[in-house]
Amino acid sequence: MPFTIAIDGPAASGKGTIARSLARHFGFHHLDTGLLYRAIGAMGGDPVAAARSLTPADLARDDLRTAEAGQAASRVAAIPEVRALLVDFQRGFARQDPGAVLDGRDIGTVICPDAQLKLYVTACDEVRAQRRAAELGVDAGDLLAELRERDARDAARSASPMRPADDALIFDTSDMTIDEAVALAVARAREAGA
Ligand SMILES: Nc1ncnc2c1ncn2[C@@H]1O[C@H](COP(=O)(O)OP(=O)(O)OP(=O)(O)O)[C@@H](O)[C@H]1O
Ligand SMILES: Nc1ccn([C@@H]2O[C@H](COP(=O)(O)O)[C@@H](O)[C@H]2O)c(=O)n1
């Protein structure tokens, strides 16, 4: 049976960094599920029609990592029909041998509730804004309000809201380097049988 690692958490908490490193370490497939919502938001028009017509080329656009794309993603992600159209693809991805790491907001709660390991990666708001600002080369003050607005919308929506699964391990990386966070995640994955 394939091994599944579900990673959720708020924006810029470091979940993608940990997910990519875990996938590389264990030779697993990796899916950044936020890209699906970012691509649908960036396509414009009717989000449900965009979700129906989504192709791998849409995920390769070079304008998906901006703050605007994050906000657009968060708005379309609140639409239940959009989320429903993406479930089968994500679950199919998770079933690949020898294993898969998926990161997002509802992986441990909705997409892969039976994942062998669930992590909920977080960090304090200011640290997350600073990390994202350093990555994008913009001011952290501007980003802080944007991250908070997006997290509030993601946590408050009725369709698959962002929240830790009951059996998720909470990873607060505020005071961890990337290497420390990854080493801890690798250790937890080994303990879980990866
Ligand atoms: N423990 C850490 N210490 C310092 N910087 C970190 C740490 N973890 C991640 N980063 C950096 O913070 C930024 C955000 O990390 P990452 O993209 O992994 O977050 P994310 O939760 O996947 O974001 P998003 O929600 O936008 O997909 C990146 O520039 C990454 O290199
Ligand atoms: N499983 C997921 C993943 C993402 N979202 C929404 O997409 C936005 C962008 O995600 P990033 O991980 O790239 O920051 C995010 O703010 C969520 O609104 C989601 O709902 N479910």
Image (cartoon, rainbow, N blue to C red):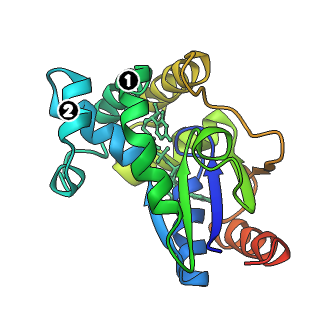
Of the two numbered discs 1 and 2 in the rendering, the one whose residue sits closer to the viewer: 1
Which residue corresponds to the image point at 76% horizontal and 54% vertical from the top-left? 175
* Mark 1, secondary structure of its residue: helix
The vertical placement of 75 against 95, above or below, is: above
Which residue corresponds to the image point at 18% horizontal and 52% vertical from the top-left? 62
Which residue corresponds to the image point at 39% horizontal and 41% vertical from the top-left? 86
Q: Answer yes or no: is residue 138 visible.
A: no
Q: Position of residue 80 (x, y in %)?
A: 44, 21
Tell me if 111 is positioned left or right of 48 in this view: right
Question: Disc 1 and disc 2: Cα gap in Å?
Answer: 11 Å
Tell me if 18 is positioned left or right of 83 in this view: right
**Quadrant of the rendered image containing residue 185:** bottom right
Q: Quadrant of the C terminus?
A: bottom right
Q: Position of residue 88 (x, y in %)?
A: 43, 47
Q: Position of residue 12 (x, y in %)?
A: 53, 45
Which residue corresponds to the image point at 29% horizontal and 30% vertical from the top-left? 68
The vertical placement of 185 against 48, above or below, is: below
Q: Quadrant of the N terminus?
A: bottom right
Q: Amino acid at mark 1?
A: Glu
Kindly identify which residue carries mark 1.
81
Kindly identify which residue carries mark 2.
50
Q: Nearer the viewer, residue 178 or 193?
A: 193
Residue behind label 1 places its C-beta within 8 angstroms of ligand 2: no
Circles 1, 2 touching at the beta carbon (< 8 Å): no
Q: Position of residue 156 (x, y in %)?
A: 60, 16
Q: Amino acid at mark 2?
A: Ala
Q: Answer yes or no: is residue 166 visible.
A: yes
